[in-house]
Amino acid sequence: MPPEWIILGLGNPGDRYTNTRHNVGDDAVRLVGTRVDAHFKAGKNDAFVAETRISDIRCVLAIPVTFMNKSGQSAASLIKRFGITDSSRLIVVHDELDLEPGDTRLKMGGGLAGHNGLRSIAQHLGTNEFLRVRIGVGRPPSADRGGNWVLSKVPQRNRAELDNGVVDAADAVELVITSGVDKAMQSVNRR
């Protein structure tokens, strides 16, 4: 029997990207894993994978080991491996330039906002109809187009608001699983 949900936390692999804005999705899924005492294992799906239960609902937590712009390889492989036939059962947790730092929102389908990880997933799945938990990282203060901004380490003075966003995103994932997408959207997107 396939899991009800696959939750994919986007980020880049390696110590160089730890504590960067681009890795907040990875951080949030790891936090969900910690809360449910899940144990991630290296898998054949270009990801660290933990099969677990959240409120007795079977879920797969996954963190791609590919770089962000190759996340679709992992998403497609996981969906195939676990027999998910409905892409709306995939939750992708990621950084979002268009939200203020720490703000968290849910979105089903729609535009990809120039996010290369989302673009890769949509290309590999042939659809963009998957749920997104968007964690705001804000826009860079200068004319930087965002690449350097999301890949740079977050200064300690700004870390608290992103950490709050990571906690809110983990809460949002759990709310989707326990209460459904519509109720979760009403609650999370109202804040």
Image (cartoon, rainbow, N blue to C red):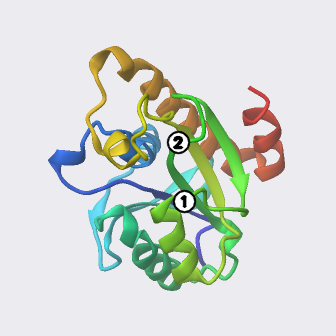
Quarter-wise, where is residue 189 in the image? top right
Please determine whether, in this image, residue 115 is positioned above or below residue 165: below
Q: Residue drawn 37% across and 62% down?
A: 68
Label 2 sits on a secondary structure element that is loop
Residue type marked 1: Gly
Q: Which residue type carries mark 2?
A: Leu
Q: Residues within 10 Å of mark 2 (few under 14, many from 20)?
A: many
**Which residue in the protein does label 2 denote?**
97
Q: Is residue 169 above or below residue 49?
A: above
Q: CA distance from mark 1 to mark 2?
A: 10 Å
Residue at (46% x, 64% y) in the render: 116
Look at the numbered disc 1 and give the secondary structure of its residue.
loop
* 102 on left or right of 127: left
Residue 157 in the image, given as x and y percentages of width and height: 33, 14
* Left or right for 24, reference 182: left
Front residue of 189 and 180:
189
Tally of numbered discs: 2
Q: Residue furthest front?
A: 143
The one nearer the camera, 173 or 158, is: 158
Residue at the image position 63 percent from the left and 40 percent from the top? 172
- Residue wearing tag 1: 114
Where does the image place residue 27, in percent across and percent down from the top left?
38, 42
Q: Residue furthest top?
A: 157
The location of residue 57, given as percent across then percent down, is 63, 57
Contact between marks 1 and 2 (CB within 8 A): the answer is yes
Does residue 127 lie above or below 191 as drawn? below
Q: Quadrant of the N terminus?
A: bottom right
Kindly identify the residue that appears in the image at 42 percent across and 56 percent down.
Answer: 10
* Quarter containing the C terminus: top right
Which quadrant of the structure image shows residue 84? bottom right
Placement of 62 over or under 176, stated as above or below? below
